[in-house]
Structure formats: C-alpha cells, structure tokens
Amino acid sequence: MNDLRKRPAGGRSARWTPWVFLAPYLALTAVFFVYPFINAVLLAFQQTNGPRSHVWVGLDNFRFVLSDPDFYTALWNTTVYALVSVFVQLPLALGLALMLNAGRSRLKGFFRLLLFSPNLVGQIFVGVIFSVIFMPRYGMFNQFLQALIGWGLEERWLSNPSLVMPALIVTSLWLYVGFNMIYFLAALQNVEKDLVEAATVDGAGPWRVFWHVTLPSIKPVAVFVVVMSTIGSYQLFELPYALLKGFGPKNSGLTIVGYLYNTAFAAGDLGTGSAVGWILALIIAVISLAQLRISHAARE
C-alpha cells in the first residue's frame, strides 16, 4: 500500500512533458502571430519611409485614411459587393441546393461537382479567364448578350467605370455560388424528413414547408454562410486585381484591401497601410457581430 503512495519515478520531468510537445507550436505562434500582431499595432501609429525609418505620429495615419476620398470609394465598392454577395449570391446558392436536394437523378453528384468546380481554380486564374470573356465584340459574354437580347456586342465591361462592378459581380457569382451551395446542400440533407412529411400531410404547401420547417432547420448554417461571405467580401483583392489588371478606371474596382495594397506596398507607407488594416478589422468585427446579434434575436 505504501508503494502505491510513492511518487512515480520521473514525476517532475513528466510534469514538463506536455510543454515539450507544445513548444514547437508555441514558438511558431509567437513568431508568426504574436510578434506580427504587436508589430502591426505599433506600426499603425508610425510613419514609415522604408523598412528602417519609423517616426511616431500618433493618430495621424487614421486621420489621413478617414479624410482620403479614395478610401471611401474603396469602402463603397466593397460594401456594394458584400451586399450583392448576401442578397444575390447566397439566394442563388440556396436555390441550387434546394434543386439538387429535391432531385433523385443519378447525375446529382455530377452536377454538384460541376457547380463547385469553379472554386477549385482560384481567383487569379478566374480573373485572367474572365478578362478575356469580357472582351468587347469577341468576348464570350458579349456574344451571349448579343444572341440573347440583341445588345452588348460592343460593350467594354472592364474599361467603362459604370460596368466594372457588374462585371466583377458576374465573375464572383460564377466563382462562389457553387461553393456556398455545398454548405446549404449539406444542411438540407440533415433536415428531419418526418417534419417535412408531417407539414405536407397537414396541408402546407412548398413555400410554407420551406419557411416554417426547412429554413429554421438550416438557420445555423445559413448564419455561418452569411457571416463568412461578408467577411470574405470585405477581404476581396485578388479577383478585381487580376480581372482589371489593377483596379479599373476611376478606381471603379478598388476594394479596401486594394486600397491597403496601394498605400502600403505601391506607395511604401507601411504605417498608413497598417492603419487601413485595423480599420478594416473593426468594420468586419462590427458587421459580423451585428449579423450574429440579429440572427440571435430572430431565433428568440
């Protein structure tokens, strides 16, 4: 009995064993997260002229950004894109998911892959491809419009400031509708079929079944998709940059991350670029929290 109460050999070293295994992770976190995070906070309050020139300027970087018309152009473009993502892209994704979930065709798996596959190629590749598709006269999109409605053959989508955002939206729909459809399709397959059948037996039509049974069942996934789509929209950069080979005439395709890129890397002002990043982080946090609060209130 006394032997059982004795401290096992190597007890002190065993206490440090978990920390030995955690050490690589903690070291990587410190190097690639903690240090950059602290440096980004300090950098936002400094004016830089190259990597070794740092002058403390307090809130001047934030004042400059909030007084710059180009920032508000970028904010407007990004917000319009985010609204389209939520109110156009996601309903299309949900509609496709409902169609695939209702069908019993053996080709269902093929159509899932077909609709999801654009997301596999990446934003840069898609931007390059659609820059050719939107070419005037010979581009596939103008040819399609000409055949469909007899208009659009000579339209210059990527050089007309009023058409740049519609071109960007069409490109993003092709890229992301199938991706978000997968989330909705997975949620729809977990809806209780007994509830759907009971509502149908009670005389509920398709719309009532969807509104009162299906939608409440998939609400957690829907909230997740809305929040993630909004965050992704406000982080948009590669797609317009590749599609427009820049940010379009009169900054018509400029996003907030694009404005950060121009400020921090094209102009070399890393301090102001860091300030833009923190303003963007605040915008995303506020919008995401508001969406979560609204969804929580609707659930109650």
Image (cartoon, grey):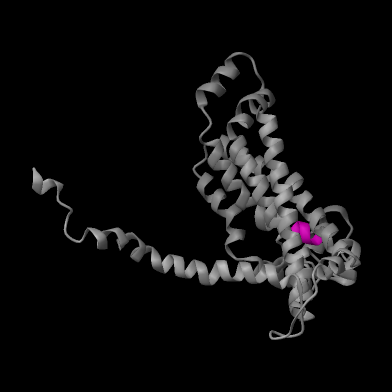
Classify residue 57 as left or right of residue 17. right
Q: Position of residue 27 (x, y in %)?
A: 46, 70
Residues 53 and 181: in front is 53
Residues 293 and 77: in front is 293
On-image quarter of the C terminus = top right
Q: Residue at x 68, y 23 (%)?
A: 208
| Image quarter of residue 239 | bottom right
* Count of numbered marks: 0
| Image quarter of residue 64 | bottom right
Above or below, 146 relative to 289:
below
> Is residue 41 among what the camera can see?
yes
On-image quarter of the N terminus = top left
> Is residue 103 among what the camera can see?
no
Classify residue 113 as left or right of residue 241. left
Residue 120 is inside the magenta segment? no
| Image quarter of residue 47 | bottom right
Q: Residue at x 60, y 59 (%)?
A: 119
Residues 166 and 43: in front is 43
Above or below, 235 relative to 111:
below
Q: Position of residue 86 (x, y in %)?
A: 73, 46
- Characterize the magenta stretch by its predominant secondary structure: helix
Q: Position of residue 75 (x, y in %)?
A: 83, 59
Residues 182 and 260: in front is 260
Residue extending farthest top? 202
Residue stretch in magenta? 167-171
Q: Position of residue 166 (x, y in %)?
A: 82, 58
